[in-house]
Amino acid sequence: MKALSISLDSFRGFSLHFKLKAILIGLVCALAVDSANAENRFTVNAGFLFPATLDATVGYEYNFSYGRAFEVFGELGNHRKIGEGQFWKGYFWNGGLLYKHQLKRFKNSNFSFRAGPVLGAVQKEFFLGLEAGFEYDYVFSNGIEFSLIQKNNVCFLHGDLFRNGLMVGLKIPF
């Protein structure tokens, strides 16, 4: 414990800016050491959901043992409308937490069930919803994964009750 207090006392003469940089570098190094197992992934997905919705998702996935994983994500979608100045009229955004359970493991791929709550807004109206679906992931030799996602959203408290569709994406280990 004394060694720890000596190392913290060595920062006493430095500026706050330098201390924040040192803490940030320490956190990045700790994440780099933790991600040596390639269990943390940055996910990027895009696709088309019925009815007439373009969708993009960015997230963070953490894998556990026995094929279980959690994903925290943010999503932006747009109900496609024809006409000048109409493109961003029907957009929505949401975020959520998904639990993924592996149903089948293959040599370089796996098939999972995914489900969880979502919370977001569409045209200044908030909504609460549930997301469920299936995910097929193929792992390349460099560790990057290709994802094919079938998703079903049920959203409450606004007019867009059901959204179903397919998304494709990548999972990048870090």
Image: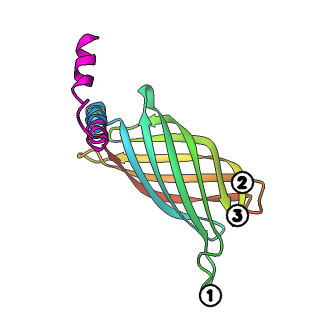
Q: Which mark is residue 127?
A: 2
Q: Which mark is residue 124?
A: 3
Camera-nearest residue between 167 and 156: 156
The residue shown at (26%, 11%) is 2
- First in sequence: mark 1 vs mark 2: 1
Using a 10 Å C-alpha cutoff, classify the residue at mark 3 as few (fewer than 14 neighbours), some (14 to 19) or many (20 or more).
Answer: few
Camera-nearest residue between 166 and 121: 121
Lateral position of residue 145 relative to residue 74, left or right: left
- Tell me if residue 170 comes above or below residue 48 in the rendering: above
- Tell me if residue 74 comes above or below residue 81 in the rendering: above
Camera-nearest residue between 130 and 31: 31
Q: How many marks?
A: 3
Residue wearing tag 1: 83
Lateral position of residue 108 relative to residue 70, left or right: left
The residue shown at (78%, 54%) is 157
Residue 36 in percent (x, y) is at 26, 33
Viewer-side label of 3, 1: 3
In terms of secondary structure, where does tag 2 sit?
strand
